[in-house]
Amino acid sequence: MAGKSKFSKDLRKKVAGIRGIFCESDGILTNGKVIYDPSGKGSKQFHFRDSAIIPYLRMAGVVTGVVSGRESDTVSRWCADLKMEFCHQGILDKVSTVKKLAEHYKLKLKEVAFIGDDLSDRGVFRIVGLSVCPADALAYVKQSADLVTFAKGGSGVLRELADLVLTARGDLQRILRS
């Protein structure tokens, strides 16, 4: 499931305690590429597996949302279509935003997982309970993360983490039985 294949007891405990999954969008939900058409309108691709798990996370009481440094109408629409709890873009200070969101949703920071892949995400990694990055993140970001997924950005990173969290909490087994 995830790039660090042997989970320590500490890592398993961290995963089981997650009640919120917050993530960057570019390089996590997308492959980080933007395609511009001749009129200058950009487009992005999202992985269906990431979107398919959001309703199940919601049913399990896991808060989901995006905290991104870049602004994109496409990301706003994707988050709204999936009924994610929040989508904050154009954020320079991700640390204070994540702290405020955790407080708003009555989450302890140790109950928040954050998925990121670049310099601006490393500060958040230091304050959350579980820091995660995709397989194709920069080397120094991987060194800062608790967990490196097998999936590359835009290829189901959120889904991989969601399945781990739901499994560790016992929710995936209940979902499969229903």
Image: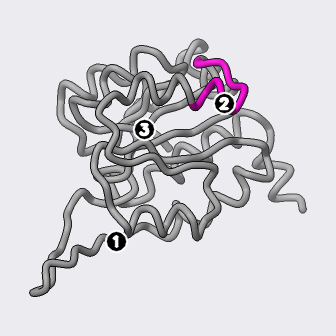
Calculate the distance from the C-alpha at mark 3 to the C-alpha at mark 2: 19 Å
Coloring scheme of the render?
A: one colour
Residue that numbered label 3 is attached to: 115
Q: Is residue 130 highlighted in magenta?
A: no
Instruction: Answer few, some or many: residues within 10 Å of disc 1's Cα (few below 14, many 20 plus, some between 14 and 19).
Output: some
Where is residue 162 shown, x and y percent of the image? Answer: 60, 46
Left or right: 45 with respect to 168?
A: left
**Residue in the image at 66% along x and 18% along y:** 108
Q: Which quadrant would residue 149 be assigned to in this image?
A: top left
Q: Amino acid at mark 3?
A: Ile
Calculate the distance from the C-alpha at mark 1 to the C-alpha at mark 3: 18 Å
Q: Which quadrant would residue 166 be assigned to in this image?
A: top right
| Mark 2: secondary structure | helix
Q: Amino acid at mark 1?
A: Gln
Q: Which quadrant would residue 101 be assigned to in this image?
A: top right
Which of labels 3 and 2 is toward the front?
A: 2
The one of 104 and 145 positioned closer to us in this rendering: 104
The one of 74 and 166 positioned closer to us in this rendering: 74
| Range of residues picked out in magenta | 101-109
Q: Earlier in the sequence, mark 1 or mark 3?
A: 1
Which of labels 1 and 2 is toward the front?
A: 2
Q: Is residue 104 highlighted in magenta?
A: yes
Residue that numbered label 2 is attached to: 104
Could you say which disc has been placed on residue 62 in the image?
none
**Residue in the image at 60% along x and 17% along y:** 110
| Mark 3: secondary structure | strand
Where is residue 33 shown, x and y percent of the image? Answer: 20, 63
Where is residue 15 shown, x and y percent of the image? Answer: 61, 27
Left or right: 114 with respect to 167?
A: left
Residue that numbered label 1 is attached to: 45
